[in-house]
Image (spheres, coloured by chain):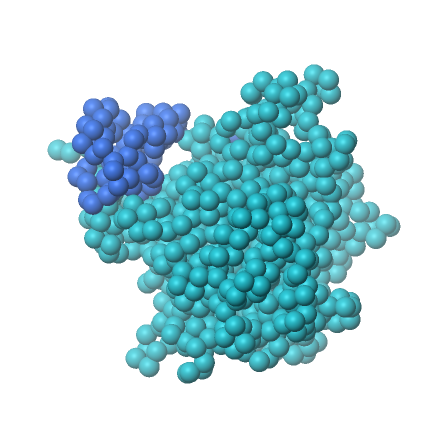
Amino acid sequence: MITRREFNRLAALTAATAVANARAQQAPAPAANVPVGDGITWDKAPCRFCGTGCHVRVGVKNGRVVAIEGDQLADVNKGLLCVKGYHVGLALYGKDRLTQPLLRRNGVLEPISWEEAIETIAQRIMAAPEKFAIYGSGQWTIPEGYAANKFIKGGLSNNHIDPNARLCMASAVTGYLSVFGVDEPAGCYDDLDKCDVLIMWGNNMAEMHPVLFSRVIDRRTKGEKVTLIDVGTRRTRTSEFCDHYIEFKPHSDLAIMNGIAHLLIEKGGMNAEFVARFCNFRKAPKDPAATPTAPLMGDAMTFDEYRAALSPYTPEQVEKLSGVPASTIKMLADLFANKDLRITSTWCMGFNQHSRGTNANRLCHGIHLLSGHFGRPGDAPTSLTGQPSASGTAREVGTLCHFLPGGRMILNAEHRKESERLWNLPEGRIHPKIGHHTMLMWEKFCTSADKGGDIQTLWVQVTNPGQSLPNLNKVFKPKAALPDKFLIVSEVYRTATTELADLVLPSSMWVEKNGMYGNSERRTQQWFRMVKPPGEARDDCWQMLAVARRLHDLGHLGMKDKDGKFLFTFKNDKGEEVPVWEWPRYYEINVDKSLFEEYRAFTRYKHKDLAPYNEYVKARGLRWPVVQQSDGTWRETKFRFSEFDDPYVKKGAKIQFYHSTTKDDKAQIWFAPAEKAAEEPDVEFPFWLCTGRVLEHWHTGTMTRRIPQLHAAMPHAYVEMHPEDARGKGFANGETIVVKTRRGDLKLPVWYDGRGHPPRGTIFIPFFDERMLCNELTLGDIDPISKEPDYKKCAATVMRAAVNP
Amino acid sequence: MLTAGLLLSLNQNAPIAELTFRLAEHPAFSPGSKQGMWLPVVMEASDDAESRELHDWIAAQPGVAFVDVVHVNFDETPTAST
Ligand code: SF4
């Protein structure tokens, strides 16, 4: 008889051998014949963590997740997982899961019933619906985000809803919108399999999107030549694998990209035919306030004006601005000038969390367009997301304060009208004014009402702003001294945010509920509930629907459509209405499916067509637009705007930017000048402070710090320094020091010659550790267009802990 | 006990025989049969710290370009709180 240990070993070896075999044969991995038995049942789900969107097979036994396996049928990861992914099942089982609603009374969170919790929220909203806000997440599932969006915009006529994706992806959104007229990448992960050159712009892919990085390393293992280039401000694990590590002075990335564009034009590397046929030139508008869309539209400029604007960015001048040798700028320009190469650019927070993040995105698209490195597999500028559904939920569902679902805008009367029609609302229900974006929302919440703080009640779901907002002492901590403000937090564990919460709602997580995510490459993914949540924890979506229903019963007119029906009316297969706001009946039907089918009707306007729910049940995700074929099957699109793959491109057009902002099917090449950062090192604060992530922990560490293996591997935060800077200060490796900025100070151990290697004059702190909140130090200066804060650059100083206790 | 199925991507000039021997000798690893430049390996770790140490150890072996994880069983792994 096979022992349990032998069984586990056999299962592990079978799975690994199947993937090895598939790689050796360069074929998709077949489903491994993992031995069956031992009472484990398996089902598919996307990983809970990053925006790569790997698929896992989840093994469940006795109502508990006991095994995880990379899904060999998944295109994204072909059976592989990173260290976080293979521990994802343990994220459910931290000992301190929240299991009961908790209400703060006399400063203490005390257990209450769900009825009391829902009533409390409904009464707060009834009292002042216009002073209520929702702060959501790129970890919301698509149906969760859709329900919240409909509830507040369509039900409460209030647009104060924004997701944490404002803190990570907003600049990519404004980049895509202003260049292509529509959000999200044209290419996909297949580009990584085809490119000759991969340039990672401020993107530590080896740690942040490790499975994608492995996909590229795999090509090298097969003997293929692929040149890897890391352009960054700190040497990382990614740099170690690269052919070129190009280190630049913080905030000078715009100068580098202008330098490349300048050389492309002056040295004949521009693809004149591509540019003439498919591109226009734009610059910042003279009057950004002229119309709400002026910053995204910009002003037209001629090619000669564009060329003249770039003329100061000679390689020598760029070297002065960026510290990158002129010869390296020329090397980069030569690569782009080579039409035989296929070049993929990737970026993530390095470009986005940047007070000129929109411009950084625009310029990167610009050098691809100018050189014609666009539209062929392997030739693509592609942003990566940090959260599993930053694209699917925050961007596509439109849970930002200025969006409606499917790429529609609040400020556009036609878009409001159409959304009202799709939601069956009376005309004029959707408020025409955009809501507060994240930073404004939290500032207003943390300001007393008499001083203009117009948000009184704020409901946070699936995110941890008490740790992830920048400049916490300004935009989060003041809440503690404002007793009339009411903070509701739906969470799975206690966090830095629940510390100030007035009401805490215990939530189901990941495979404890049905869900759908949308990853970085436009891939929509689906999974079913596999295990039950602990105690009284309930789904976030149910919480929203239960509050909506209570408001309906209290007589809030917004909770009814124009026919007087409740906004969230769902029927079973027999056509009978099911009161899903009653928790015992919530899973009587598939609420996700009902919400998703309703949402689908919104998706065609911007050609982000989604297939019916059941298609996603069968697939390991599908990349939109997903278009039905004449034989009734559904086909995904890998390469948008390219005739060979995108069904919406006109025959003979070759490439067609069919949502062009200039309505001529052309993309926009922007000029944007290099500018100084909002705060730069000086005598008092002589270091650049950069913050970021580490391989083992995902975002604020709420889940991964509860996974023993990951916690043991990276138990606490640290400050990375260059060894000479540290030794110059007399710091021993591991010594606790103080890092100070104009906004706060923080004690933490110094680490040099460790994992990352910042250059002299730069320090780095990861943000995963709630006991060492680096966001008490960050500046949070925002990009004027995307409103995304800069977490990568501010001025800091360091000192011995003993002299500054 | 944590049991993981690892996939080692090997360098072109990896000393394959030596590597396989070293893994076979190690009580925590059981190598499978090499497929092209990929070697499947089973890893068993008794506790949290060991799992990480073993991962780092195998990644540092001459000839190993990258370590991916394909499968993990943790049904007897303890849970933690922070
Ligand atoms: S790369 Fe991201 S999605 Fe894939 S397993 Fe790791 S954390 Fe999960």
Which chain gets the blue colouring?
A: B
The image position of residue A481, as x and y in percent, is 78, 38
> Chain A colour?
cyan
Q: Residue furthest left?
A: A1
Q: Is residue A723 in view from this perspective?
A: yes
Quadrant of the drawing holding the N terminus of chain A: top left
Front position in the image: A723 or A41: A723
Q: Is residue A218 in view from this perspective?
A: no
Front position in the image: A538 or A391: A391
The image position of residue B46, as x and y in percent, is 32, 25
The image position of residue A89, as x and y in percent, is 40, 41
Q: Residue at x 83, y 53 (%)?
A: A452
Q: Residue at x 36, y 59 (%)?
A: A194
Residue A402, compared with residue A244, is above or below; it is below
Q: Residue at x 37, y 26 (%)?
A: B53
Q: Residue at x 59, y 67 (%)?
A: A669
Q: Residue furthest right?
A: A450
Quarter of the figure with residue A491: top right
Relative side of A197 to A486, left or right:
left
Q: How many labels were placed on the picture?
A: 0
